[in-house]
Amino acid sequence: MDPFLIPSGQCAVLQLFSFKGAISKTWGAYRMFHSRLFTPYFPGLQFIKPLGIGSGHGYRAWPKWEASGFFMVFENAKAAMDFRSREEFGEFLEKSEENYCIFMTPTSSRGSWSSFDSWQISEEKGTSGLICSLTRASLKPEFLYRFWKMVSPISLEQKDYKGLVFSQGIGELPLVEQATFTVWESVEEMEAFARKSFHGEAVREVYRLNGFKEQMFTRFFPWHSEGTWGGKDALAPYLSQKIPPVFSVY
């Protein structure tokens, strides 16, 4: 059997955790809050954000108190794998009721997240055809009500939108620091939602009113997923290979 081929260059990782029971939930919240104490010093780690997880489908202001996660950027896939083998990270896997991880390669980006914009854009497009979109915004306080008033229609419209594979709202702070991560079957279907739906109208309205303090729009192709979220690995039908213990990097 041929070895699993992993893209070279920069590797982004979205990691989600869900905890069950008061003790595990409290532990998860505490460790996530204090994760900044050990993560910045790991070799190859370029960027990390501890995340809260939004409730419902896609866009929701109210968080899932039992869930949390990380968005991370590494120099390469090996650094990402090494990070996940750390004892501290293993504790999250052990104590969580459910966890899900998506490995990705950046293909385009504009804007920044807490001043991070050091993306190493790849010309590779992946073999699955899937495209991931991370839309992140920091809202000005005076626009919070106007923005969240538009959220419910977006969430309802997105739920059954053609080509949507996976969607999860994430963020640093409820209401103020928000991001949405989605996975689509194709670029065309992703762009159709962004431009032709109420979502596109909402984004244009916030831009018109200059309601963002900072924003970032980044695309990736996913090349590996593991674990489950909501009882399933949504990307598994599209990603045929799984990483074995020994792998090669192309």
Image: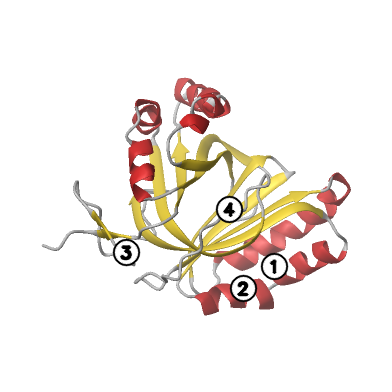
At 68% from the left and 47% from the top, the residue drawn is 115
Q: Nearer the viewer, residue 117 or 234?
A: 117
Q: Which mark is residue 193?
A: 2
Reply above or below: 165 against 21.
Answer: below
Q: Label 2's element?
A: helix
Q: Label 3's element?
A: loop
In space, the residues marked 1 and 2 are separated at their CA atoms by: 7 Å
Of pointers 3 and 2, the one earlier in the residue sequence:
2
In space, the residues marked 3 and 1 are separated at their CA atoms by: 28 Å
Of pointers 2 and 4, the one earlier in the residue sequence:
4
Using the rendered view, name the quadrant where residue 2 is placed: bottom left
Tell me whether circle 4 and circle 3 mark residues in contact (CB < 8 Å): no
The three-letter amino acid code for the residue at tag 1 is: His
The three-letter amino acid code for the residue at tag 2 is: Phe
The residue that label 4 is drawn on is 118
In space, the residues marked 4 and 1 are separated at their CA atoms by: 27 Å
Q: Is residue 45 left or right of residue 133?
A: left
Tell me whether circle 1 and circle 2 mark residues in contact (CB < 8 Å): yes
Q: How is the image coloured?
A: secondary structure
Tell me whether circle 3 and circle 1 mark residues in contact (CB < 8 Å): no
Tell me whether circle 4 and circle 1 mark residues in contact (CB < 8 Å): no
Quarter containing the N terminus: bottom left
Of pointers 4 and 1, the one earlier in the residue sequence:
4
The three-letter amino acid code for the residue at tag 4 is: Ser
Q: Nearer the viewer, mark 3 or mark 2?
A: 3
How crowded pointer 4 is (Cα within 10 Å; few <14, some 14-19, many 20+) is rated as few
The three-letter amino acid code for the residue at tag 3 is: Leu
